[in-house]
Image (cartoon, rainbow, N blue to C red):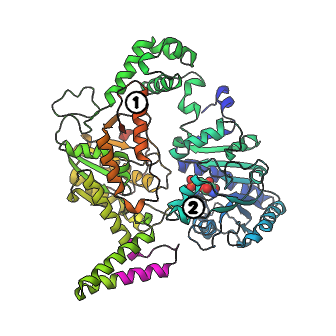
Amino acid sequence: MKISSEVELREKIKVEIAVSAEAGAAIVADEIVSLVLKKEARNEKAVLGLPTGSTPVALYRELIRRHREALVSFRNVVTFNLDEYFPITNDHRESYRRFMGEQFFNHIDVPESQIHIPDGNLLREEVFSHCQEYEELIRLAGGIDLQILGIGRTGHIGFNEPGSSKSSGTRLVTLDRLTRLDAARDFLGEKNVPRHAITMGVGTVLSAKQVILIAWGNNKADIVARAVEGPVTESVSASFLQTHSNARFIVDTPAASNLTRINLPWLVGPVAWSEKRTRRAVCWLSSEVNKPVLKLLDEDYNENGMAELLIEAGPAYPLNIRIFNELQHSITGWPGGKPDADDTNRPERAHPFPKRVVVLSPEPMDDVVSMGGTLSRLVDQGHLVEVVYMTSGDLGVPDAEVGKFTNNLNETACCLGREWNPQVEYCQQIMELLNRKGLFDYDSNEVRQLKGLLRRAEVREACWGCGIDPEHVHFLDLPFYQKGHYRQFHLSDDDLKPLLNVLRHYQPHQIYITGNRENPISVQALCFELFSRAYRGISDEAWVRDCHVWLYSGREWTFSPFEVDMAVPMSPAQLAQKMEAIDQHQTQRSQTIHNAERDRSTACLYDKLGLAEYEAIEVFQRWRSELIKTKAPLAVIES
Ligand code: GLP
């Protein structure tokens, strides 16, 4: 894409937008490989600064692939990792040392002596000198040639939380609440996340010769835009990269979505006014000038960079009415279509009625969090709803929940007498496995199975709360999840079959799914990828042509009104019912779910646009299969 000078003025760091995270990772891998080869030719060592987190996983996989194909050797590479939790033991499953081994170093030929990672396993009084030594080692290696970074939601690079100064060096820091919350899932609870970390400083990062920051997924969109377009400030440490002469961001399209050139392109140059863009612009204008759509004036358009739109589609009033009507038509209390009503302007067709509906939930709870109210409506309105949980969700269950369950079962069995011995034995076996595991090791299959069963029980209660009988609740327990761990999942042909079977069995008229905008290695993104491959494989089957696919929002993001094709309002009582259903996921209490507020604030947005004022709203986007990127199918899909 050619960058206009207006874009350059706004984007104070060079940003490349890749079509996908894989494509972005390939660009970074190219940079690394060419640096390594160049240095090798000069008989020098390449010095890399490396990050952890889910973002670089795609990059490490790509580098491992190239190494296996003998395209690159890392013998001449020296690495410095950005950070490490403190205190943490080296073999702790969440230690960055272990992460780097599992994700990268164990699969390439970099010599152990050339790997440097801050040591989280020191005494507190040893940390200061360790940090000084770390800086010295970087200096002795000749400085970092290429520093790769991810970005945290607080805008941190490494663990340089808001408040870190531009000249800061490697040091011990205290982690921000949001950072600890983000890590809570991996550590099975916020209380287990270390309070501190050792991190290279902003100054250390800025002294690298070249810096590339990578970001994937919708969750990063906001902070990427702030770092690139906002002021240089200690409150977003990534913004300091604006002062580096050779820094750039490589992001995928969801992570780029809040940049002005993507979000508000008419502010940075002429645009083609498609229907969707017009709707986006009018909604934005309404919030910018704080007026409902129907009250926008010609002057409002002119004064806010939308004069061209006015020429093409104006004057203001008929344009306002058109957009208002479009928004109005997206709102429906009949997500499955209203039988026997004129459906010309409704998001979903009236017939057939009742509809067969399949709701795909990547992990337990995705469904009820983002569409619990809609689920109830579909059932109440007589549709045949099947809820399908693609993965068991056992990885998110804290050990304490297993302890509670086994204690309970054990005690019950003891009260009831001898014939309950097998239950007592089972409890003992599970408790032994847990005790042997140590607090932070991976679970054995037996424990994982029990954790999965605990989630099944919660799911059934939550579904029941939405009016769905247990016989309409299905569990696929897809193998990629059962065999994997967070950040270490690999899809295979075996994952496709159960999904295809379900879809072919029910031949739904509506499918609900989420995950299209998430970080590509998240469970949700992998499940969506699987769904889109399955769907593409069966797109010729007659029933598929009559099936509408609706995307629901993620746990941490939601659609904006301009991109919504169906908005389903909830009354206060319906919202309360939904919250009660979410509460059934008791093992997930440590997860932050601000859902009542989110659904309420979505309703507020509609209200501000001048539409009816509802208590809460759930939103959906229609997915059309031609939008999916073409990829080789995982497996040959036979009918
Ligand atoms: C942690 C790491 C950062 C990383 C960030 C984002 O805080 N210290 O280096 O960039 O997480 O993680 P993720 O890539 O998982 O979103």
Front one among 288 and 387: 288
Helix, strand or loop under label 1: helix
Q: Which residue is mark 1?
A: 606
In the displayed structure, 603 sits above or below 413; it is above
Front one among 90 and 73: 90
Front one among 461 and 347: 461
Q: Quadrant of ligand 1?
A: bottom right
- Percent across and percent down for residue 481 are 41, 64
Q: Which residue shows up at 51% across the image and 44% down it?
A: 218
Label 2: few (<14), some (14–19) or many (≥20) C-alpha neighbours in 10 Å:
some
Mark in front: 2 vs 1? 1
Q: Which residue shows up at 74% across the image and 64% down it?
A: 78
Magenta stretch encompasses residue 434? yes
- Percent across and percent down for residue 444 are 43, 76
- Percent across and percent down for residue 260 are 58, 31
Q: In which image quadrant can residue 76 be found?
A: bottom right
Q: In which image quadrant can residue 484 be found?
A: bottom left
Residue at the limit of the structure toward the bottom, as seen here = 418
Label 1: few (<14), some (14–19) or many (≥20) C-alpha neighbours in 10 Å:
many
Gap in angstroms between the C-alphas marked 2 and 1: 48 Å
Residue at the limit of the structure toward the front, as seen here = 415
Residue 262 visible in the picture: yes
Give, as a single range, the part of the protein colored magenta: 427-449
Tell me which label, 2 or 1, sits earlier in the chain. Answer: 2
Helix, strand or loop under label 2: helix
Q: Which residue shows up at 37% across the image and 44% down it?
A: 552
* Dot label at residue 65: 2
Front one among 392 and 141: 392
